[in-house]
Image (tube, coloured by chain):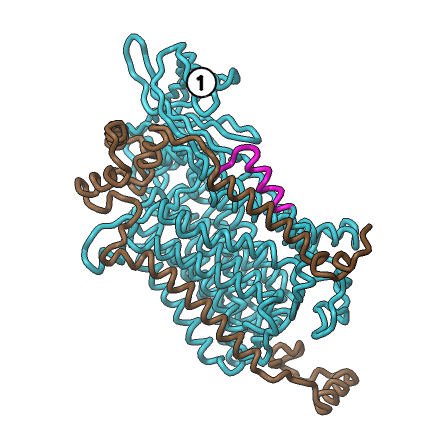
Chain colours: A cyan, B brown
Amino acid sequence: MNLALGRAGVTLGLAAAILGAVTVGYGLIRHRPELVRLSRWYAALVFFGGLLAAFAMERALITRDFTLQYVADNGSTKTPALYNFATLWGALEGSIILWALILGGYLVAVVLKFRKRLADPLVGWALFTMLVVCIFFFWLLVGPANPFKSFSPPVGFDGPGPNPLLQNHPLMAFHPPMLYLGYVGFTVPFAFAIAALVTGRVGEGWLLATRRWTLIAWGFLTAGIILGSWWSYEVLGWGGYWAWDPVENASLMPWLTGTAYLHSVLVQERRGMLRVWNISLLCATFALTILGTFITRSGVLESVHAFTTSGIGVSLIIFFALIVLTTVVLIGLRGDRLRSPGRIDSPLSREGAFLANNVLFAAFAFVILLGTIFPLIVEAINDDRVSVGVPYFNRMTMPIGLTLLFLMAIAPVLPWRKASGELLRHRLLWPAWIGVASMVFAVVVGARGFAPVVAFGLGGFAAGSAGRQLVLATRRQGWRGLVGRANGGMIVHLGVVIIAVAFAASSSYVRQAEFTLTQGQSAEFAGHTLVYEGQNVKIEEAKIVNQVLIRIDGTGPWAPSLNKFANGNQTIGTPSVRSTVTDDVALSVIAIKDGENGSVTVRVTVQPLIIWLWIGGGVMALGTLLAVFPGRRRNPIDAVSAPLSVEPPKEPTGATA
Amino acid sequence: MSSSSAFAKGSPIRRWGPWLAVAVVAVAALSVAAFGTRSAPTAQDRVSSISRTVKCPVCSGESVAESNAPASQEIRRQIAEQVQQGQTDEEIRSFYSAKYGQAILLTPSASGVNVLVWILPIVALALGIAALVIVFRRWSSMPQERASDEDRELVESALHSDEPANESDPHGEGASR
């Protein structure tokens, strides 16, 4: 039943996507708007197909229908309900169902949003592009990543359940869907970029039509990345939250190019410039989501996220090549229209800062791409093995990150077209004082080392600059000074600063040690006192939990544990973290010795300001929401840029968009 | 209030004084941060910082510091011994790369083909900056375009006609600027 339902859903989705793409494509070429308008029905069918497939899989998982290979491989009668539900995205095939479902959802959302313009060739070609992407993902579900394979379970069969790491923390239920909402969301602006190239309407119309879509996708991707690092901090137990693991890099690369795009698109909206660059960035972002999926899912690189080695890798890399080829050819064909006669008057201007931002973000993404695939390159060149890990990424990205912080401090106060030194001196003084004050504060509370203190100073500088914009905007417009793209963007900047400071502090001042303690024994580490009180064994249905009870500075007891799962002989540790606003003490059990004295070995990681990473993530999400909220409508004839060769005003008088 | 001309509005001291103060405080804070006394790293800190740069030989992509595999625990113990014996960080690292091959180190060495991983990003960044410099040069040598009477007429006629200029492009998105 579930098998038939799921197969029906996948087949329906694939058929609707193919027929839809053919119909819409034919209608567009032959100028038959009535055919193009049919896209809404095909979109609905594609979405329904995805929904049916997801529903069938969830139903099979919940009813433990082991006649499905996927459920037999990843389900278990012992798995708790939440993790059982999340098993849909706990392995490769199921995660493609989620992808297809979200893609169908975005397709329907686009059709609803543009329902009055469905016959407009721009929207038509965008829907055509999205339908083609749908064909690819539903085809994966039919062919290389078929989740609806049958299995004949012997009597009394019970599956192994999902990977123990994936049933150890509730965040698992939220991080992958968020990430996929972000990844898949970039399909929408990508489709419109392709549509703009095909129709030749490469002006600003498609940008305005998709800017909120891009922002929403970006917001989901941001939230997904931060939830993912929170998950890894709470679950993996090595004391860190970001390991520059290939899958983390794969999610960060499209985030970086997407962030670059969100900034440079403003130059095009205002000045009509950088058309080729913006289209390239957007296509690169979409292509990188596919490349990232390839890197992590094909098993070419070892990673905790590489589910299996499967035939899906070839399909993904071909699809990636197709995207790149299509984009390059289309841009080449439209070269004449993409050229814009505008110019940027001065590097010391808002648009100049955005250009610098783009170069830095592109370099950042390049470093990460290079570092991630470099072991493959070396192996291909001279058959040698080499590892590129955390120390490399930290060393290479630190200077880029610091420069970006500096730019974040300068750029928000720059006017369009041209800034004078006088204006900068005036506007940046207070932010600079805040930056210096944060350096002094850091040094007074004991921070040492050049790079981290520079990071704190630049963080304060950037926060001052963002805060200054917000203060001016709220003075002028009341609460509306907090909404809209520019103001919401400044709140996102504040979130970024919080994360940057927390990252600099936690990675510079991390202290880690191992202690072997017998019952009642205590240890001193990094200003904290740990007392080992004893053990506690909890027997749950899916696992046996051996807890080690430890008091930290008299609080607690905190209970890091070793879990033995009923199925499989893997032992998985669960860390326990005491968070305060100043520092985190993370405990994880390394070994529990049997025997009389029953000593335990625990790893203690003390890192400052960790909690601010998650708070900063929340601020970024809030800022994105406020940015999506429509801001004050700008009077189209208001001056927004400083007039040339005239003394600029002391304070901005017009609203910035 | 001083009425002396050096402190008058717009004088260099009034304009630059506050920034000079910012710079002085910043330099002072940074020099304390960079050269001030700090507690020397303990043996334990050295062990954890070294083991963060050595890859766990049996797991995927984790460092010896992160991994709980018995092989990693053994290497951590060994590193602690080597630190006790007074070996330098570099000596310890090269010991492991000699024993397990260079892939055991998470930082690729700057020799042979590995140089590329360090050089290419710098080359790419330099190219990006060079490209920016070139476009700005070109832009600054471009003549400023002024609206001609013809342009004004075009705007005037567009403002007074109710019909969109181009049927297939009602929003004028295809028009190049």
Q: Nearer the viewer, residue A464 or A387?
A: A464
**Residue shown at the point (82%, 55%) measured from the top left:** B3
Q: Is residue A112 visible?
A: yes
Quarter of the picture holding the C terminus of chain A = bottom right
Specify whether A214 is left or right of A538.
Answer: right
- Bounds of the magenta span? A434-448
**How would you classify the magenta stretch by its main secondary structure?**
helix
Outermost residue on the left side: it is: B99
**Residue shown at the point (58%, 46%) measured from the top left:** B26
Q: Residue B157 in the image: state x and y as whole percent.
A: 76, 87
Q: Nearer the viewer, residue A55 or A621?
A: A621
Q: Nearer the viewer, residue A436 or A592?
A: A436
- Mark 1 chain: A
Q: Is residue A261 above or below residue A623?
A: below
Q: Residue A33 in the image: state x and y as whole percent.
A: 58, 76
Q: Is residue A515 above or below residue A350?
A: above
- Residue indicated by mark 1: A530
Specify whether A473 is left or right of A560.
Answer: right
